Image (cartoon, coloured by chain):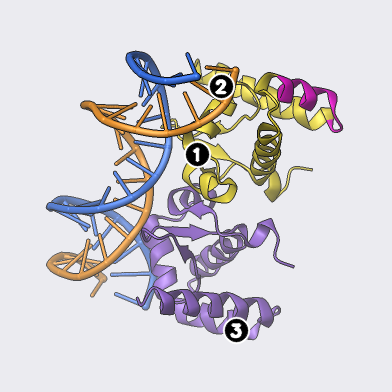
Chain colours: A yellow, B purple, C blue, D orange
Amino acid sequence: MSSYKDKKVISIGTVNELTGLSLRQIRYYEERELIFPERTKRGTRKYSFADVEVLLQIADKREEGVQTYEIRKDMLRSGDKEKVIERMLRGQINAHFKMK
Amino acid sequence: MSSYKDKKVISIGTVNELTGLSLRQIRYYEERELIFPERTKRGTRKYSFADVEVLLQIADKREEGVQTYEIRKDMLRSGDKEKVIERMLRGQINAHFKMK
DNA sequence: CGTGTAAGGAATTCTGACACG
DNA sequence: CGTGTAAGGAATTCTGACACG
């Protein structure tokens, strides 16, 4: 089920190289709940390849002028609802345990 | 051919968590040419999931008391010779361009 | 041979905020 | 709303070396 694609092992700097998005943008999309990285003990964000793919999609939408709120709605509406929900739950759970 | 499994995106600290090997050990196995991480501009090592798997195998061998030199020979002799050679070439090439 | 450690420096990441709009 | 940036701190990673054996 959960393979390499979903393992959260990539740091934000590498995600920046992989997507071309600025650190600010990557963090902001998390704030808008479009993406849900994990956190190491220290608090460093870790992303999966799946996250990188989502970010690439977000980048496309943003270029089209779509707002983050709309993108989020689209994601919830579209295809693999399960995946999205799973990602979101993981994010929530993490946030909860770290008592953000 | 080359999928997520081979993309070098994991930092040494994360590899340490994934394998349980110390940073010292991970770096040493590179010195012994058992593993070939890439380097970022700055010089930081980046590993792939495939590298992590190899490290796990190395760890097993070491526990059995096998020396790194023997492990290296075994790797060259065993199964996917292509993969090994490919990995080594990548390592060499990287080393060359960075003029280690 | 294989691995630990202290050493000093350089780059990374984090958060909260001000800015513009 | 979305993104840039300067700010200060904390943790990461790097290399070369001494240590033990």
Q: Which residue does the numbered mark 3 point to in the structure image?
A: B76
Instruction: Report the side of C3 relative to A73 (left or right).
Output: left
Which callout, 1 or 2, points at the residue further toward the start of the chain?
1
Residue A75 is drawn in which quadrant?
top right
Q: Is residue B90 visible?
A: yes
Above or below, D11 relative to A49: above
- Magenta stretch bounds: A70-80
Query: Which residue lies at the image location 55% right of the left edge and 46% below the top edge?
Result: A20
Amino acid on which disc 2 is placed: Glu
Q: Answer yes or no: do the residues labelled 1 and 3 have beta carbons within 8 Å?
A: no
Query: Which residue lies at the image location 63% right of the left edge and 22% below the top edge?
Result: A33
Amino acid on which disc 1 is placed: Ser
Residue A91's x, y, as percent?
63, 25
Q: Which residue does the numbered mark 2 point to in the structure image?
A: A31
Of residues A30 and B73, the one nearer the viewer is A30
Number of the front mark, 2 or 3: 2
Residue B37's x, y, as percent?
49, 65
Instruction: Report the side of B86 relative to A84 (left or right).
Output: left
Residue A22 image label: 1
